[in-house]
Image (cartoon, rainbow, N blue to C red):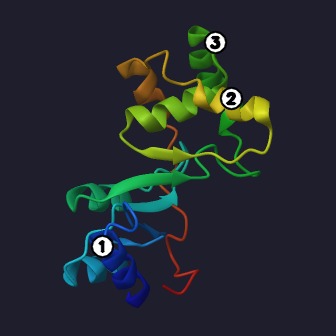
Amino acid sequence: MEAFIELDKLVAEGKIRAAGVSNFKPYQLQKVLDAGLVPALNQIQVDPERQSADWQAFNTEHGVRTEAYSPLGRKKSGFLSDPALARIARAHGKSTAQVTLRWHVQSGRAAAPKSADPRRQSENLDIFGFQLSPEDMATIDAMDTGVGPFTDSDEFGH
């Protein structure tokens, strides 16, 4: 809390444009909100299999934008090879990663994919020249397992 208070002071002084939090569950974010502070964003893990709907809804309700880290999943995630996602990608002439990033953007989230490969970085940016249909969006939304990261524990001890 103290660190965010100091960041908020820097925003007020115009030294930084915005301050956010990472992995704050709704009850943790509520403590910040109760102090009269509103983070610009809450960066949480969101991907088609782990949509963390409750976290996202709480963020939205309180004017905090959700930013997805690991928006393309992690090594154990297999959704990028899901046949339904591959079908959507083929229909748009895009990769499944591009379709997934477009899904994030169309859902109102910021997405922060990680790649050291310049080709992948370029591909990750090439998501604004197409639009997913409502059916495409519903197909990807239906991939949610209902299990979010850190659902049953405070892994990071916030």
**Residue, disc 1:** 13
Q: Which mark is residue 86?
A: none
**Residue 7 percent location from the top left of the image:** 39, 77
Residue 4 placement, left or right of 116? left
At 48% across and 15% down in the image, what residue appears?
A: 130
Of marks 2 and 3, the one in the foreground: 2
* Visible residue check, residue 66: yes
Q: In which quarter of the image is the N terminus?
A: bottom left
Badge 1 crowding class, 10 Å Cα cut-off, few under 14, some 14 to 19, many 20 or more, is few
Of marks 1 and 2, the one in the foreground: 1
CA gap, disc 1 and disc 2: 35 Å
Q: Tell me if residue 79 comes above or below residue 47 in the rendering.
A: above
Residue 12 placement, left or right of 81? left
Of marks 3 and 1, the one in the foreground: 1
| Depth order, front residue of 5/55 | 5
**Residue 62 percent location from the top left of the image:** 22, 62
Provide the secondary structure element on which disc 2 rests. helix
**Residue type beneath disc 1:** Glu
At 44% across and 56% down in the image, what residue appears?
A: 52
Residue furthest right as drawn: 117
**Residue type beneath disc 3:** Arg
Q: Earlier in the sequence, mark 2 or mark 3?
A: 3
At 50% across and 51% down in the image, what residue appears?
A: 68
**Residue, disc 3:** 90
**Residue, disc 2:** 122
Residue furthest bottom as drawn: 2
**Residue type beneath disc 2:** Ser
CA gap, disc 2 and disc 3: 19 Å
Q: Earlier in the sequence, mark 1 or mark 2?
A: 1
**Residue 132 percent location from the top left of the image:** 44, 20
Badge 3 crowding class, 10 Å Cα cut-off, few under 14, some 14 to 19, many 20 or more, is few
Provide the secondary structure element on which disc 1 rests. loop
